[in-house]
Amino acid sequence: MAFDWGYFFSLFSIGAFWQACVTVIVISTLSWGTGLVVGFLLACAKLSAPRWVKIPVELYIWFFRSVPLMVLLVFVYNLPQLFPVTQPLLGVPFIAGLVSMTVTEAAYMAEIHRGGLLSVAKGQSEAGHALSFSFIGIQRLIVIPQAFRISLPTLINEYITIIKLSSILSVVSLPELLLTGQRLYAQNFLVMETLLAVAVYYVMVVTVFTWLFRALENRLDIQRKRPQTLSEAECQALRQSLPALTEEIKTPAVNGAPPALDLRGIRKSWGQHEVLKGIDLQVENGEVISIIGPSGSGKTTLIRTINALESLDGGEIILYGEDYLKGGAIVDKRQMRAGVRRIGMVFQSFNLFPHRTVLDNVMLAPRYHQLLDQPVAREQALALLDRVGLLAHARKYPWQLSGGQQQRVAIARALALKPDIMLFDEPTSALDPELVGEVLKVIQSLAREGMTMLIVTHEMDFALSISDRVVLMENGVVQADIAPQVIRSPLEAPSLQRIREFMGVR
């Protein structure tokens, strides 16, 4: 029998088919959207929840990924036979189909979200913590936007899959595209013409939503955004519109005043390996201390305990004479976050937020803590970027900057909260030699202004030139705590031999 082209084209003027398209779109969108939210919650639970929550979540994902959708659909639709009270809901084909598709998609989307969340670098959460963000704030502003961008192509593909899976709903007599076609060819026996039309309807729906999602994906693709460097004229105009960046006067330490930091008996272990073995260290207000030592000596671990990135196994940290952190004690989250807010942190690997511009990176923390209104926060951020020599790059994204420029942005971001203390974790070790100088200049300017700083560094000449004291750590203990002028002096003393040898001082 010849293919009836006239009948085929006539099928695109039948209202039942267009109504079926609407049904497919509505049920697919609802199941995808609900599955998106539920799947994200399941992914978060699987990654970080306690074991009594994690195990049921893992069982849910395992079960609903294992059961075929058609089997689940028939079961849900017939569930009122066991529980008659569910008849008003599950007895409706649309609702039964929506429930079945949603619980199935939530299981698949949980794994998609988990992959996206795991792809966000750990340093991003640490940077949020260093800015005193809450867990919810870190997830909302930093982790979820990045994870969503990573997962978006797979989530879009899942939506397309749901549209095609909607054809299974014909088994519960939901009038979607396939069932509409089946009813027609059961009357006229023109099977090929009708099924080809059904296929074309599916292709049209998928094509439209593919275009829409592609537009969304392109809009969120940071690599497509290429903001340009501001011209000198634009920078000059910005400078004239900005108020002078006011610097708080750092009061020098006076007799009887508490130290900025007082570390007492700090201990930290990784399994059986004790990294910090009872560290005692006092840092006076306005003092600059460089911490040096061979790799694995505990330098980075020590400063990470100061801003609570690592918990204490023993000892305590007192911040300006007030209790801050104690080893083995229940952490007071409010007290801890208040202390962290007074301590700026600059990481070895920058840890800038890649989904935000340079300007947004700097103004994010003051806006989150509601310290400044939007216009004032923007002005302060621009002033800080000008201070570190990056005003012309304010509209760029971190990936467009060199390593030295990114590190200077990280310093500006830390300064935006006006901290009392700055921590630097090997700020130049990830930089090419020619970029080291531009970062060190910024740190030197902070030292001249009286900023209290602890700097973990391998730049020995820099440590000698900038520091009030140089602390040598080895094997988890402080081996020496000496002023640079003493290290350089001709004085011969056994206590100076090792630190001079390590720093290459003759």
Image (cartoon, rainbow, N blue to C red):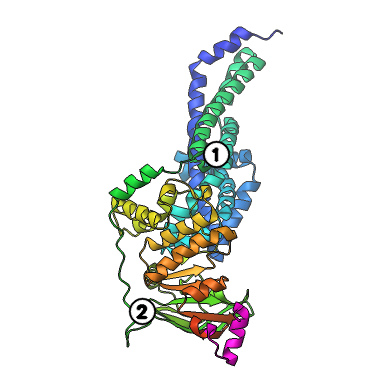
Q: Position of residue 407 (x, y in %)?
A: 50, 59
Task: Look at label 1 and name its amino acid.
Answer: Tyr
Residue 57: % across, % down: 56, 56
Q: Nearer the viewer, mark 1 or mark 2?
A: 2
Q: Which residues are magenta?
A: 487-506
**Residue at 44% over, 61% down:** 411
Q: Residue lying furthest front in this view?
A: 490
Residue denoted by label 2: 320
Pick the residue in front: 285 or 146.
285
Q: CA distance from mark 1 to mark 2?
A: 66 Å
Residue 474 image position (x, y, % from top left): 60, 81
Q: Quadrant of the C terminus?
A: bottom right
N-term mark: 1 or 2: 1
Q: Tell me if mark 1 has few (under 14), some (14-19) or many (20+) residues whose alpha carbon lies within 10 angstroms of its own.
A: many
Which residue corresponds to mark 1? 77
Check disc 2: other Cα within 10 Å, few if <14, some if 14-19, many if 20+: some
Q: Is residue 340 visible?
A: no
Q: Is residue 388 magenta?
A: no
